[in-house]
Amino acid sequence: MGLSSLSARLTKLAERETAPATLGGKTIDLEGSRYVLVASKSEERLMKFLHNLGVPAKWQLVDVYGLDADILAVVPRPVLAVLLLFPWSVKFTDFNATKEDGTEKDQTVSDKVYFLKQVISNACGTIALIHSVANNTDKIQLGDGHLKQFIDDTIQMNPEERGEYLLSKAGGIITAHKEVALEGQTEAPDENEPVFFHFVAFVEKEGSLYELDGRKSSPINHGSTSPDTLLEDAAEVCKKYIEHDPENLRFTVVALTAAVN
């Protein structure tokens, strides 16, 4: 991140009025952080969506307030997945096209990675959450319900078939998505309405860090990671997103973690 861009970002962050960040009853000191993030304000609704679909209460979604090491250190462990919400623009269209050209051609992708293509608009959050859970079923003991049934039914399908199955035969998941999306709104969003924000998920599988974006042709392998360093390694990729549009303050990171007692 260049000095002028960093200065502009820090100036805007200093001007923004925010409440002190807290996690697990601890106040997080954001002063001096280069990568302060916007609180999602929706992690409770997203977690309600997952709980309604059978994810046990021992798992939770928490805001990650910054990407510096001292801030990441207070995030509860273990971390099973990291979700990035970012403002979609022409800049990111070009950025993602460059990534696909340079990364996807010569990469190795484990056949253990569960990947789902997004075939409808305004479902990227749902897709990211499914990616987060479906790639951690060895740790998350899903209860019987629509999500477990969907994963069981589609485990042998290819990504395109999974996307079509979600659209045509997974009515319970779509209904849960719409119910949560409606909370705080007076009318349902049009599923074909233009989208200005986009979710991607990061998971660890067989020692590699994967970026899962349902609008891409395949997962992106970002190299080595481990269950213990997933958050830190995913944060490095998130920083690249921020550095591509450093004056934009509308980046949010959420982690799927063990619940804080």
Image: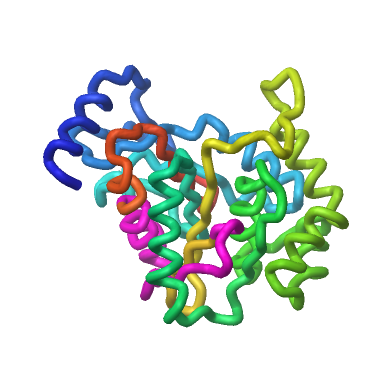
State the residue at coordinates (67%, 34%).
Answer: 193
Q: Position of residue 142 (x, y in %)?
A: 72, 60
Q: Position of residue 159 (x, y in %)?
A: 68, 69
Does any portion of residue 122 appear in the rendered image? yes
User: As drawn, is 6 to the left or to the right of 89?
Assistant: left
State the residue at coordinates (59%, 51%).
Answer: 59
Q: Position of residue 34 (x, y in %)?
A: 22, 40
Does any portion of residue 261 appear in the rendered image? no
- Comparing 93 with 160, the one in front is 93
Span shown in magenta? 213-239
Against 189, residue 66 (above or below) is below
Q: Position of residue 79 (x, y in %)?
A: 47, 58
Against 153, residue 187 (above or below) is above
Against 48, residue 114 (above or below) is below
- Comparing 109 with 26, the one in front is 109
Would residue 225 be counted in the magenta stretch?
yes
Would residue 255 be counted in the magenta stretch?
no
**Number of residue marks:** 0
- Comparing 24 with 103, the one in front is 103
- Comparing 30 with 24, the one in front is 30
User: As drawn, is 30 to the left or to the right of 2?
Assistant: right
User: As drawn, is 60 to the left or to the right of 33?
Assistant: right
State the residue at coordinates (19%, 38%).
Answer: 5
State the residue at coordinates (52%, 56%).
Answer: 201
Figure quadrant of residue 253: top left
Colouring: rainbow
User: As drawn, is 172 to the left or to the right of 108?
Assistant: right
